[in-house]
């Protein structure tokens, strides 16, 4: 009997296929300085983000259904489902014209989504700590957390004190709120992953590892946005950085896929 393809493998293979096909097109368009390069990300790229965000929401709902209402992890996954819904809404609103809709997109897929995940991982941390396990960060964990904390401090300084008296735009205000939340979320994700590794690792540890990767990639994307806002950047380089959001959406979909797969295997 043929072995069943796991949900994480489906997400990974679909993402790799999209990246291989799309990556070849981007390289060719960038090499030829084609004016069609931004259009590639504006149409198929955005559709890919929506598809990944939709998969992330569906898989998060499936993961939530693995737990009863009385189980503490059910609260964690309820918050993850709400965060995934905000992520999907952000991808859909990306297609809608209008400043108001774009501001709503930035808020939902930014601070609101991040705050929901911060709350969810805080509950997960409390659950793991009650188990009596130790989940201290290792040496490799301190580098991304240190960089995130350092960039957060610099971003706040740049927006509030860099140019005294300069007005803060709506986009800058959203970043100002979201960056510290992302830093806190990254620390939580690293600690939760360490706790899950102490419990034996496996698919659950890979689930929290995927969340950690998604947060890291999102942070990289915000750093890129900040850098590009401070000076002109060649279109090919700018367009290449847009791949960050594909990776973030893929990682956010991969995390619940690991959780669902872990519960499926445990039930066999």
Image (cartoon, rainbow, N blue to C red):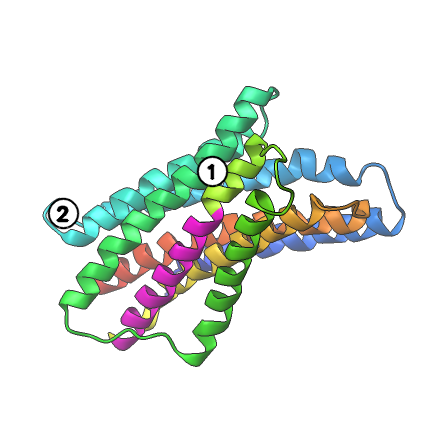
Q: Is residue 173 left or right of residue 268?
A: right
Question: Which part of the image, by quadrant, shows the N terminus?
Answer: bottom left
Front-most of residues 174 and 121: 174
Disc 2 designates what residue? 68
Question: Which part of the image, by quadrant, shows the C terminus?
Answer: bottom left
Going from N to C along the chain, the mark reached first, 1 or 2, is 2
Q: Is residue 262 left or right of residue 213?
A: left
Disc 1 secondary structure class = helix
Q: Residues within 10 Å of mark 1 (few under 14, many from 20)?
A: many
In front of the other: label 1 or label 2? 1
Residue 97 marker: none
Give, as a single range, the part of the protein colored magenta. Answer: 179-198
Task: Please indicate, yes or no, whether residue 267 appears anywhere in the rendered image.
Answer: no
- Verify CB contact (< 8 Å) between mark 1 and mark 2: no
Disc 1 designates what residue? 109
Q: Residues within 10 Å of mark 2 (few under 14, many from 20)?
A: few
Residue located at (36% from left, 53% from top): 256
Front-most of residues 57 and 18: 57
Q: Is residue 12 left or right of residue 188?
A: right
Residue located at (9% from left, 48% from top): 70
Residue 214 covered by magenta stretch? no
Residue occupying the far left of the picture: 70
Front-most of residues 181 and 140: 181
Residue located at (23% from left, 45% from top): 65
Q: Position of residue 185 (x, y in %)?
A: 39, 55
Q: Is residue 221 left or right of residue 24?
A: left
């Amino acid at each position: 009997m043929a072995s069943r393809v796991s949900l994480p493998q489906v997400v990974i293979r679909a993402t790799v296929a999209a990246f291989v096909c799309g990556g070849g097109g981007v390289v060719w368009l960038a090499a030829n300085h084609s004016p069609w390069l931004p259009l590639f990300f504006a149409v198929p790229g955005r559709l890919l983000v929506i598809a990944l965000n939709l998969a992330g929401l569906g898989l998060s709902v499936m993961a939530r259904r693995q737990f009863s209402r009385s189980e503490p992890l059910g609260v964690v996954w309820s918050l993850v489902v709400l965060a995934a819904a905000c992520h999907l809404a952000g991808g859909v609103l990306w297609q809608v014209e209008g400043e108001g809709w774009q501001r709503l997109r930035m808020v939902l897929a930014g601070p609101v989504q991040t705050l929901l995940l911060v709350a969810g991982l805080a509950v997960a941390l409390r659950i793991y700590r009650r188990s009596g396990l130790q989940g201290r960060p290792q040496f490799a964990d301190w580098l991304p957390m240190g960089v995130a904390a350092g960039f957060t401090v610099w971003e706040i300084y740049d927006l509030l004190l860099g140019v005294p008296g300069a007005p803060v735009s709506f986009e800058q205000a959203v970043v100002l709120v979201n960056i510290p939340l992302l830093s806190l979320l990254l620390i939580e994700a690293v600690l939760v992953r360490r706790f899950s590794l102490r419990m034996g690792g496996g698919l659950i540890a890979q689930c929290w590892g995927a969340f950690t990767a998604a947060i890291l990639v999102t942070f990289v994307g915000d750093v890129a946005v900040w850098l590009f806002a401070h000076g002109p950047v060649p279109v090919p380089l700018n367009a290449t950085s847009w791949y960050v959001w594909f990776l973030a959406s893929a990682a956010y979909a991969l995390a619940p896929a690991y959780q669902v797969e872990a519960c499926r295997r445990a039930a066999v």
